[in-house]
């Protein structure tokens, strides 16, 4: 990567509203804490957290174009647009910021849905996104309590929260979120 951490922060923070940048700062803080607690690389966790929402505020049409034109996961286009920024963010981290570590790229790619066989870094960044200090939604304290016990218990609580919300709103559940949850439970 050609940019210093400070240059990267300046570049990424300029692509989102201040409120979202505060969220990113919280994810950075929590990712490093979780990495140190559970044995992941805190430097990689910090870098993935800086970039995890880099494409969050891109126009939907631009995200769709990036997915279609670069051979990314087009199945996502059949699901909630909130999922698209993870796939695009992973691509942008490589293309625009020169991140070539597949562990970091994957942590960005899977931070919203999880995946079957999540890596330690995937788990850290995904869970940090749920429980960063600025998050305030019903059930977040339960997820934080579970995160104190284990990454897996925290993520299961997080996925349960997402799935319950989607069910209550009669919205489609992205299948990988269900598969990720089930995989975590199967390996407890």
Image: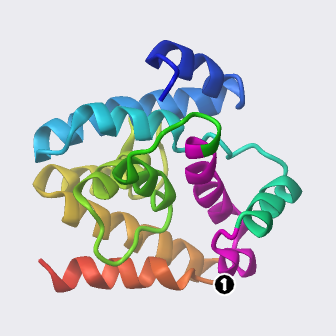
Helix, strand or loop for disc 1: loop
The reply, left or right, for residue 102 in relation to residue 55 is left
Residue 138 percent across, percent down from the top left: 45, 56
Asked whether 65 or 185 is in front, the reply is: 65
The reply, left or right, for residue 82 in relation to residue 153 is right
Position above or below: 172 against 17: below
Point 80% across, 63% down: residue: 64
Q: Is residue 110 magenta?
A: no
Circle 1 packing at 10 Å, graded few (<14), some (14-19), many (20+), is few
Residue 139 percent across, percent down from the top left: 39, 58
Point 28% across, 51% down: residue: 121
Asked whether 121 or 95 is in front, the reply is: 95
Position above or below: 140 against 50: below
- Give the magenta range: 71-94
Marks counted in the figure total 1
Q: What is the basis of the colouring in this image?
A: rainbow
Query: What type of secondary structure mainly makes up the magenta span?
Result: helix
Residue 77 location, quadrant: bottom right
Position above or below: 66 against 185: above
Considering the image in quadrants, where does the C terminus appear? bottom left
Residue 86 location, quadrant: bottom right
Point 52% across, 85% down: residue: 175
Outermost residue toward the right in this view: 61
The reply, left or right, for residue 155 in relation to residue 135 is left
Point 34% across, 78% down: residue: 116
Residue 93 location, quadrant: top right
Residue 174 percent across, percent down from the top left: 57, 80
Residue under pointer 1: 170
């Amino acid at each position: 990567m050609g940019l210093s951490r400070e240059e990267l922060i300046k570049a990424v923070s300029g692509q989102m509203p201040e409120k979202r940048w505060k969220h990113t700062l919280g994810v950075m803080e929590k990712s490093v804490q979780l990495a140190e607690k559970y044995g992941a690389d805190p430097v990689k966790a910090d870098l993935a957290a800086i970039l995890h929402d880099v494409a969050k505020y891109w126009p939907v049409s631009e995200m769709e174009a990036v997915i279609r034109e670069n051979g990314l996961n087009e199945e996502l286009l059949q699901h909630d647009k909130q999922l698209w920024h993870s796939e695009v963010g992973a691509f942008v981290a490589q293309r625009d910021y020169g991140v070539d570590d597949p562990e970091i790229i994957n942590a960005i790619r899977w931070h919203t849905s999880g995946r079957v066989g999540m890596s330690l870094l995937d788990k850290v960044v995904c869970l940090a996104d749920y429980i960063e200090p600025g998050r305030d939604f019903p059930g977040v304290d339960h997820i934080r309590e579970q995160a104190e016990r284990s990454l897996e218990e925290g993520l299961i609580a997080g996925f349960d929260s997402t799935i319950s919300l989607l069910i209550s709103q009669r919205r489609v559940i992205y299948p990988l979120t269900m598969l990720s949850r089930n995989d975590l439970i199967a390996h407890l």
